[in-house]
Image: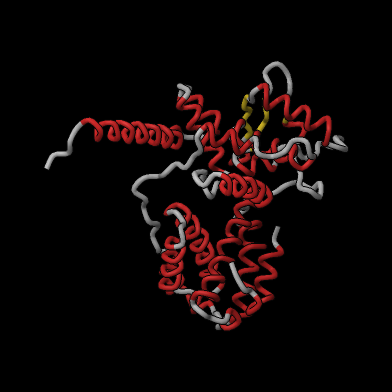
């Protein structure tokens, strides 16, 4: 049976609500990441290719279209690894579509066969200690909102946590004593405990005593302004707000800072302080130390640049979109939380 555009919407629905959560048992965060990729792809199809989404069919989901989308995504500033993550989600959808649309298995197999591009080296973006201090201390702790934002930025850096790990933190995960720690719920449903500084512990203690109401039932440590569990978009917005304010007054400050740069910055600062790479691996929750080694390579690159800069002074050189065209599908994608 040939599938029309309504069936394509049904295919997306089945992929996100049945196949991923029930058949593949993927986590909520992975499903939302796949949803965002499909939204971005549909935006490209609609706004860049000028295709009415209501007329888009499974037979139009071709290798050439996906390659053009990935190229557009990279040209608009996405890293190679980010593009590869998008490709992974698209290939997963193509694999599912093959099960549901046997008549289109040939073009769908070609989508699944697209190979990820290899990046020459993974770049680590991080802030200096001075820049990180300026950002963390930007919120005004004399207001409830500013105090909450200060706690979020401080914990994001001092614990080296992933943004979702911060979102999932509850009061029961905080241990404030002589050697204060936080318990993080990491990837693969694994927990790890990390030490936080006395300054961070005192900040959290003051925040809980002042602003955390109804501490019964293990509530989240930080919430949004509606007193609900904060999400990664909310944290991203908070970071962007203060980065914009700082950059306006100081153009040398990075114009964009993403959530993961706090984690990168913490790792680089620990390495610069001479902390053992094995401890940094455990602190970050890396399974394989090879993942942690990206910070060593980044540190060595910075040292090499400094040496070359000095040498040049001494030695002369030898000779998202209007979705109104397909409200039903996009409203469904936007409804997933």
Q: Is residue 309 left or right of residue 45?
A: left
Where residue 270 sits in the image (x, y, percent)? 50, 27
User: Which residue occupies the foreground of this view, 327 or 203?
Assistant: 203
Quadrant where the C terminus is found in the figure: bottom right
Q: Classify 254 as above or below 158.
A: below
Q: Is residue 109 visible?
A: no
User: Which residue occupies the foreground of this view, 20 or 149?
Assistant: 149
Q: Classify 178 as above or below 290.
A: above
Q: Is residue 291 visible?
A: yes
Quadrant where the N terminus is found in the figure: bottom right
User: Which residue occupies the foreground of this view, 296 or 3?
Assistant: 296
Residue at x 59% of width, y 56% of height: 33
Rendered image quadrant of residue 134: top right
Q: Is residue 317 left or right of residue 30?
A: left
Where residue 328 sits in the image (x, y, percent)? 69, 75
Residue at x 46% of width, y 71% of height: 108
Q: Classify 46 as above or below 206.
A: below
Where residue 175 sits in the image (x, y, percent)? 73, 25
């Amino acid at each position: 049976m040939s599938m029309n555009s309504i069936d394509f919407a049904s295919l997306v629905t089945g992929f996100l609500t049945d196949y991923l959560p029930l058949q593949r048992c993927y986590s909520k965060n992975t499903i939302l990441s796949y949803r965002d990729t499909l939204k971005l792809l549909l935006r490209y199809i609609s706004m860049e290719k000028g295709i009415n989404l209501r007329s888009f069919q499974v037979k139009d989901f071709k290798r050439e279209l996906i390659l053009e989308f990935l190229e557009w995504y990279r040209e608009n500033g996405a890293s190679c690894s980010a593009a590869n993550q998008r490709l992974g989600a698209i290939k997963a959808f193509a694999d599912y579509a093959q099960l549901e649309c046997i008549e289109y298995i040939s073009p769908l197999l070609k989508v699944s066969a697209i190979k990820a591009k290899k990046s020459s080296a993974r770049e680590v973006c991080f802030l200096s200690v001075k820049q990180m201090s300026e950002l963390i201390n930007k919120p005004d702790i004399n207001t409830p909102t500013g105090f909450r934002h200060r706690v979020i930025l401080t914990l994001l850096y001092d614990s080296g946590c992933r943004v979702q790990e911060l979102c999932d933190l509850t009061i029961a995960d905080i241990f404030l004593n002589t050697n204060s720690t936080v318990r993080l719920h990491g990837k693969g449903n694994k927990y790890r405990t990390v030490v936080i500084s006395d300054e961070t512990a005192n900040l959290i203690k003051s925040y809980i005593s002042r602003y955390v109401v109804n501490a019964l039932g293990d509530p989240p440590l930080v919430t949004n302004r509606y007193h609900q569990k904060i999400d990664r978009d909310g944290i991203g917005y908070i970071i962007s707000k203060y980065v914009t304010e700082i950059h306006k007054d100081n153009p040398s400050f990075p114009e964009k800072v993403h959530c993961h740069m706090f984690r990168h910055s913490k790792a680089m600062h620990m390495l610069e302080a001479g902390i053992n790479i094995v401890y940094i691996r455990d602190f970050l929750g890396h399974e394989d130390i090879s993942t942690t080694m990206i910070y060593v390579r980044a540190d060595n690159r910075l040292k090499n640049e400094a040496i070359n800069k000095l040498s040049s002074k001494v030695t002369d050189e030898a000779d998202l979109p209007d979705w109104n065209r397909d409200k039903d599908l996009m409203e469904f994608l936007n409804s997933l939380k």
